[in-house]
Every structure is written in structure tokens, then in C-alpha cells.
Image (spheres, rainbow, N blue to C red):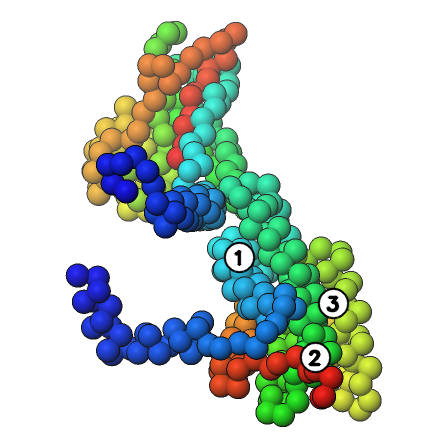
Amino acid sequence: MWKKLFAWLDERLGLNDLYKATLDRPEPKGNWWNTLGSASLFLFVMQGLTGIFLSVYYTPSPDHAYDSIQYIMTSVAFGWLIRGIHHWGSTLMVLVVFIHMIRVFVTASYKYPRELTWLIGVGLLLCTLGMGFTGYLLPWDQKAYWATTVGTSIAGSVPFLGDFILKALRGGPDLSALTLSRFFAAHIWMLPAALAGLIGIHLFLIIKHGESAFPDKDD
Amino acid sequence: MAGSGHISRRDFVKLTTAAVGTFIAAAIGLPAIAYLVDPALKSAKADAWIPLGKFETFEIGRPTLVSFTRSQVNGWEKTVTSHGIFVLRKSSTETLVLSNKCTHLGCQVNWKADKQEYLCPCHDAQFNINGKVLGGPPPRPLNSYSGDQLKVENGTLYLHFTEG
């Protein structure tokens, strides 16, 4: 029964080929440093899931943002756990993505034919940092407020365009409800969409080229 | 294998994997479900004994309006609702306590002493002094409080008010 069902689906979806291409592909000899990309992907999925859960109670408005998070932390069952995972997961994700980048650099895995994989990885790193920056404002406490004030001021120091960039980031000359809602939109829609798209291309390229072997003495 | 009381290595691994997998799924899934349905598990019911005033001071034969407010916290938002109660002392011992909420659409009814009836300003509903419908759209008499919903303690009349 199940075998028949699987055969029917496999004939139409190519499940076996998919499995071979993604999970059963030949790999050069590697070590634990090769698992950091998968770890980043896992953290992305985990941040996505806990983030979706947080959005059930979080309210991106200056009147309610802080109180709604207090509510999640003190009143909702396992709210402290979900936010705790999201909070620490974000730091861990930046860390893991960074070490992943260093590993790729050290083992020279960014070279031909994998230059595009590296470039897209740069995009992924920037998106990850963007997620950290926009997410930091959402608790709307003193730390969040002033960190974003400073962060957007730095962006505002760009020659000529600085003032425009600052206003575009803040949604006006000062931090306000507009800043909070646009950071929220960037944090839950724009950046995750960009991340998901780039991750798709990144994975496709990895499957296409296979993983790089570590350089040996002759390289 | 089967019947021999001996479990093969393959079956043991299968069983252990299934057991550990189930445990992990439950450890992640149950808190997730609890998190989502949490507000539904919390009782919104609140009750309190509201002091309406000294029993002796209510005039016999004339309904007196007593107003009080109740606050409710939903998540991180607090809402305050005001309520009105008509207290009618019929004799030295008998009282009639009516809600001032019209049973039609919830407007607040007023006591018209000259007509001896409650009049709703929204759709001209009329109730007699006992809360019975005299005319207009209301489907039933004004809500009344009686029995163990009322008590007199140290000369003060209390109303047992429940909401939710």
C-alpha cells in the first residue's frame, strides 16, 4: 500500500532523484567545520518558526511593543522559552554564519567554480546582520531605542546621501512609530524573503557543484 | 525474533529511534501548542462583591441609580467598563435590584419618576418599576439580581457581580 503510493508519487515528483541529489550526494572527506552551513540553515528555520510564534502576541506599536513582550515573558505559557530561543538564536546565527564564512575562506572553497556561491553568501551574511539590526529595535526598550539611534546615525554619516539614508531608515528625522513599524516589516517580511530566496540559490549551487575538497600540498 | 523473547539489533534501533523521536516531538510540540492556545486556557471570569451603599439610605419606593466601574485586563491592555444598577427598596426588608442595561441593545435606561417607568433613550422602550416590558422592542424584562447575589453586611448592601 505505502510502497505503491510512494511509487506513484515518485514517478510524478522524482522523489528518489531529489533524495539522491540532496542527501545522498558524494562528498569529499571533510570534518565538523563542513557542517556550519547546515547549522546556519537550521538556525534560519528555527528563527523563522520561533519568530512566527512571537508574532502571535507581539505588537509593533510604541504603545504596546514593550508591554506585549512583557506579556509574552511573564504570562504566556512557554513564552519565555520561545523568546529566549529567538533571542539567543539570533546571536548564535550571526556567530555560526561568520565562522562558516571563515571556514570557506580558509579552505579556499570560494574559488572557481564557486565564486557565485561565495557572492550569494555575502548577501546572506548582510541579510543576517540586517535581521539582527532590525530585530534589536523591536523590544522598544531603552537599549533598543538608543542602539537604533546610534546605528541609523552611523548610516547617516555617508557623504552626500547620508541625510536621505537616515530619514529613509527612520521613516523621518527621528525615531518614531514609523521607525518601529518599518523595522518590523523589514524584520518579518523583506529580509526573511530575501534570505529564503538567496538560501535557495546558495543550496542549488552547492548541489550543482558538490562540496569542495580541502586543498592539499599540491594546491 | 517474534516469540523468542529476543529482540534483534535492527528492531531495537527502530524502537529506540521511534521512542526518542516521539519524546523529542512531544517536548517541542506540546509547549508550542500551549503557547498558542494559552489565552483560551485562562479564565476570563471575574467576580466581586460590589458595595452599593448603606441599605437604610435607599428611599423606599423610589429606584436609585448606583454606578461603579470594573476594569479588565486582556493581555497587556486594560479596559474599564462602567455599570449602572437601580436599587429599589420596596419595604424595610425587601429590595429589588435591576441592571440599567436595556435588554434590547444594551443602552442605559433612565428612571422617569413622573411616569413611574424606566425609559430607554435609544428606541423608546418602557419598563415598569419591576423591570417588566411595557412597550418597545426589548425581548425580556430588565435583568434583576436576587437571592444569594445580594447581601447586607454591617448595614451595607452588596451585589455579587460576575463577568465573563
From the top left corner, tell me how far across and down residue B20 is, in percent: 44, 45
| Label 1 chain ID | A
Question: Can residue A148 be seen?
Answer: yes
**A113 w.r.t. B95: above or below:** below
Asked if the residues shown at circle 2 and circle 1 are in contact, with their CB atoms under 8 angstroms apart, the answer is no
**Front-lying residue, A40 or B10:** B10
Q: Please tell me how crowded label 1 is: few (under 14), some (14-19), or many (20+) other residues with Cα within 10 Å.
A: some
Residue marked by disc 1: A50
Question: What is the secondary structure assignment of the residue under circle 1?
Answer: helix
**Front-lying residue, B55 or A103:** A103
Which disc is residue A148 wearing?
3
Question: What is the secondary structure assignment of the residue under circle 3?
Answer: helix
Residue at left offset 76%, top offset 89%: A161
| Mark with earlier residue (2, 1) | 1
Residue at left offset 29%, top offset 31%: B142
Name the kind of residue labelled 2 in the image. Answer: Thr
Q: Is residue A189 left or right of residue A87?
A: left
Name the kind of residue labelled 3 in the image. Answer: Thr
Q: How many marks?
A: 3
Residue marked by disc 2: A107
From the top left corner, tell me how far across and down residue A37 is, in percent: 59, 71
Which disc is residue A26 wearing?
none
Same subunit under labels 3 and 1?
Answer: yes
**Front-lying residue, A92 or A179:** A92
Marks 3/2: CA distance? 36 Å
| Mark with earlier residue (3, 1) | 1
Closer to the eye: label 2 or 1: 2
From the top left corner, tell me how far across and down residue B8 is, in percent: 35, 45
